[in-house]
Amino acid sequence: MMKKIFIIFSGLLLVYMIWPGPSKISDFKPLPSSAKSTLEGDTIQIPNVAAYFSDNFRNFVVPFYLKNYQQNTYLPFPPLRLNHPPEYSWEVIKKHTETTYLEELVYPLRDSLYVNGYEIFRPDGTPIFYSVPKLEEAGKEWPTKHTLRLYTSNILARIIVWAGIIISMKMIFRLGGRIVKE
Amino acid sequence: MKLKILNILEKTSFILTLFLFAFIPLYPKFPLLNIAGTYVAVRLEDLLIAVVIVFWVIGRYIRKDWDFFTKDNTGKAFLLFFLIGILSLLSAILLTSTVQLHLGVLHFFRRVELMLLLPVVATVFTTKKRLTSALIILCLTLFVVNIYGIGQQYLDWPLISTTNSEFAKGLILKLTPDARVNSSFAGHYDLAVFLASVIVFLTILFFMLKKRWKILIIILGSLSLFVLVLTAARVSFVAAFVGVISALIFAKKKKYLLLIFIILGLVLVYPSQLRDRFVSTITINLFNLGQRYEGRNLNQQLESKLNIPTLPYKMASRSALAAPFASASAGVPVDITPGEPIDVIELAVYRSYQIRFNIEWPRAYRAFLKNPFLGTGYSSLGIATDNDHLRSLGEVGILGTLAFFLILLSVWKKIYRGINNEDRVVRYFSAGTLSVIILFLVNGLFIDVFEASKVASFFWMVLGLNLAALKLKE
């Protein structure tokens, strides 16, 4: 019985891990009512990065990409939503990224989409501190800027890791049993 | 000829390993080789341990004796743990992109290096004389560690610290007011874990040795307890008592438990930073009491809510590249924010709690969610999580953590049989080692004890010594 469950689990895990998903940032929709950033660092300098100046705030942007990510992946469940400290953006987006929040949408053991928000105005239009810098793009001032970065993984790497997980599980069960009986 | 080489190798391994028992705790953490991207440096002790391991491997190779890894379940669990570590690194580099290759490899090898001390010691200490020499060296080392700690506190003796990136460059420092002794351990937590472990062993030695030695044990034990109080490390203090209590239970000396509780009560009543920290833990962290900093004006109160280091805002008090917390050891920090306690000790206790609950532990939890099987790889959680069990789940996932606990379970089961051994030395030693395992697991709830190099190497060496003792008697 245990063997059957383990085989089914291994099969399902493999299917989940090799299931196709988005491979580049352009697979994701642009934010509605936004202007795509043409600033250096937001275009081609860093792989799989896109940034949008927009009127949208966190409570719209993150669910928007959560849904879009699931649509791109065709999996029956949405990605996990992880809230990171803003300063982590310097590691996962790029150095000197301006941030007020950073969230990661992740399908464990597959790929991640980081959503970095820079919201220096509140939804009611008031600045969050005095003398906030201007966010200008396409001849217009915007209250927020959102930067996306997609981290994908190679399918061969996923298969190797899958095999490693399955073998490790088997070895742990086998050795654990021996140690307990010892 | 082969026998002669083996003999030389074996003797050299013994002398070097014996030297390690003193060198690791006593040699200050001077950096030898700095690594880009971290302030953890390669040190002289790493090279020395590597030399010992190389000698040991050559010896095993000549003997063609790999029984520890091929026949012994503990050795197999070691191999499994290392393999899962490599797999976790692979997944961190290729799948989750959460580690830099060189840092991940460095962290992995450090664990391998420290853990391999167990089989080295278990196979090198083959006679009772050798075991005794290790215990004598440990007692002498402990004496020096204590005297040096007291010297730092009262005579301004120099110290090396690795509590922040600047100190970790090997600066020679002196203790500032309210700072805590670290002796030769470069961090008061590490010293406290070491002292807590040796207090457990001294309790056991007290019953194990003959009358004329008992007075020496009492002196050494009292000295160690005093320095442990000077470190003001609450978790290690609690862990020490848990360890001593379990040692008494394993050694079948339950009638001394009352005495231990009296000593515990006296230490907690004695005015010290340790006592103040215990009180602050309750008043500040549990009941949210105490006087708080309200800010110079309303503007500062508002500004404190914008304390995001990545904002281009003048009042942001820290850089995104700097450590996310400041040492509260030298007076009230300049970056105190509204809502934080004004009292220096209360502030330190408050931040110690906040750092764990709001920064380090959630980071480990996120890493675990990201890859529950293999974690996000060695080094992905930075230098500290301040909870070794969470760190393990975050770095190597459920598989790596299970493999690690298999090692401990396997060693535990072997040593547990030792507490019924007919030889009283083995019996008491086993009781002490089992208690040290418990002590480390308790300490691991708030400190990364299995990664702190000095105490972790001490841990694996002590386990190795006990396994060697068991083999002697078998």
Image: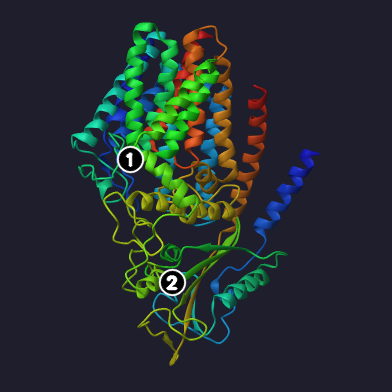
Q: Quick check: A45 left or right of B72?
A: left
Res B209 quadrant in image: top left
Which label sits on residue A99?
2
* Vertical order, B435 against A72 (above or below): above
* Vertical order, B189 against B430 (above or below): below
- The residues tagged by marks 2 and 1 sit, at their Cα atoms, a distance apart of 34 Å
Can you give x and y, in whole percent of width and height, for residue A137 in the image? 43, 87
Can you give x and y, in whole percent of width and height, for residue B331 in the image? 27, 53
Q: Which residue is mark 1?
A: B187
Can you give x and y, in whole percent of width and height, for residue A35 in the image? 50, 86
The number of numbered badges drawn on the structure is 2
What sort of colour scheme is used for the picture?
Answer: rainbow
* Vertical order, B125 against B70 (above or below): above
Can you give x and y, in whole percent of width and height, for residue A168 in the image? 62, 40
Q: Badge 1: few (under 14), some or many (20 or more) residues near its Cα, within 10 Å?
A: many
Q: Amino acid at mark 1?
A: Gly
* Quadrant position of the N terminus of chain B in the picture: top left
Kindly report which numbered mark, 2 or 1, lies closer to the viewer in this rendering.
1
Kindly give the residue lying farthest to the right in the view shown. A1
SS under mark 1: loop
* Vertical order, B190 against B75 (above or below): below
* Quadrant position of the C terminus of chain B in the picture: top right
Q: Badge 2: few (under 14), some or many (20 or more) residues near its Cα, within 10 Å?
A: many
The chain to which mark 2 is attached is A
Which label sits on residue B248?
none
Res B254 quadrant in image: top right
